Image (tube, grey):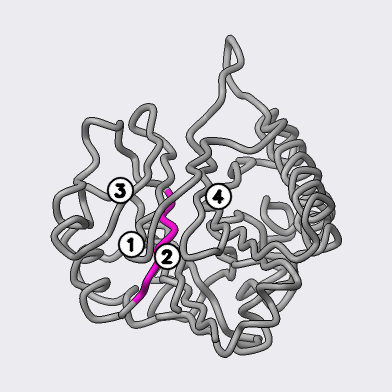
Amino acid sequence: MRIATWNVNSIRSRVDRVEAWLARSEVDVLAIQETKAREDQFPYLPFEALGYEVAHIGLNQWNGVAIASRVGLAEITVGFPGMPRWGEPPAPEARAIGATCAGVRVWSVYVPNGRALDDPHMAYKLEWLDRLAAAGRAWLAEDPQAQIVIMGDWNVAPADEDVWSMEFYADKSHVSPGERAGFRGVVDAGYADLVRPHAPGPGVYTYWDYQQLRFPKKQGMRIDFALGSPALAARVAGAAIDREERKGKGASDHAPVVIELS
């Protein structure tokens, strides 16, 4: 079984690339982030033509998460328990969706960006990560043998080797102690990084900004992760970042991350 995560940076702009990638990648389940589409705007038909069912939540032109599966899609849940809200008045955003696919509980998450270290959005981001860790801990307390993967765009580079230059990011978001602690909180709740053992750094990234020729200069960040429960981690036979998909016209600024399960 092959599962993957991909921030597509607008599903309507990139549906042809996603469709082509699915056709050649043999992925059974794809967690998608940043669809930037309302429910009535999501292009379901190309996925259905390839044999995938889709669960999607999108409220406006921002955020949006989905799960596409060709091995079943059950127990769909929008948002996790205690998920923080944002805005005035505070309202839930389309940042998390879960579904059970062939016995694996898959969560597609799009962690808030945080914007800047002193921005109110950063406090929202840190609370979001804390609540996700609490939810993940509760899921394992309920069933220690549960096969769970929390995958998506975490907007956190948890180690220095996960960015091309710590000097460049010294006063920026994504690498601050608080953000890294938030990511580590989910790991400490019982969820292992499924990719790092198979794609170690340095120089291994999942995101490259469109500006300043970051991709050809190999100036990226690793901010897309799949964190798995112990029962699921025991099944991982391999993992890879499909850097090739970042190339060419109309590419997302993120690359797909693929996990192979035995």
Helix, strand, or loop for circle 2?
loop
Across and down, in percent, residue 138 comes to: 80, 46
Which is more N-terminal, label 3 or label 4?
Answer: 3
Label 4 Cα neighbours within 10 Å, binned few <14 / some 14-19 / many ≥20:
many
The answer to whether mark 4 and mark 3 are in CB contact below 8 A is no
The answer to whether mark 2 and mark 1 are in CB contact below 8 A is yes
Amino acid carrying mark 3 in the image: Ser
Amino acid carrying mark 2 in the image: His
| 246 relative to 78 in the view: left or right | left
Helix, strand, or loop for circle 3?
loop
Across and down, in percent, residue 123 comes to: 75, 33
Question: Separation of disc 4 and disc 1 at Cα?
Answer: 17 Å
The quarter of the picture where residue 115 lies is top right
> Which quarter of the figure is the C terminus placed in?
bottom right
Numbered tag placed on residue 109 in the rendering: 4
Helix, strand, or loop for circle 1?
loop
The verdict on residue 219 being magenta is no
Residue under the image location 29 percent in, 77 percent down? 247
Give the residues drawn in magenta, as a range.
Answer: 27-33
The verdict on residue 30 being magenta is yes
Residue occupied by mark 2: 254
Amino acid carrying mark 4 in the image: Val
* Residue mark closest to the camera, 4 vs 1: 4
Label 3 Cα neighbours within 10 Å, binned few <14 / some 14-19 / many ≥20:
many
The answer to whether mark 2 and mark 4 are in CB contact below 8 A is no
Numbered tag placed on residue 98 in the rendering: none
Numbered tag placed on residue 252 in the rendering: 1
Across and down, in percent, residue 57 comes to: 40, 36
Question: Separation of disc 2 and disc 3 at Cα?
Answer: 11 Å
Q: Main secondary structure of the magenta part?
A: strand
Residue under the image location 57 percent in, 69 percent down? 221
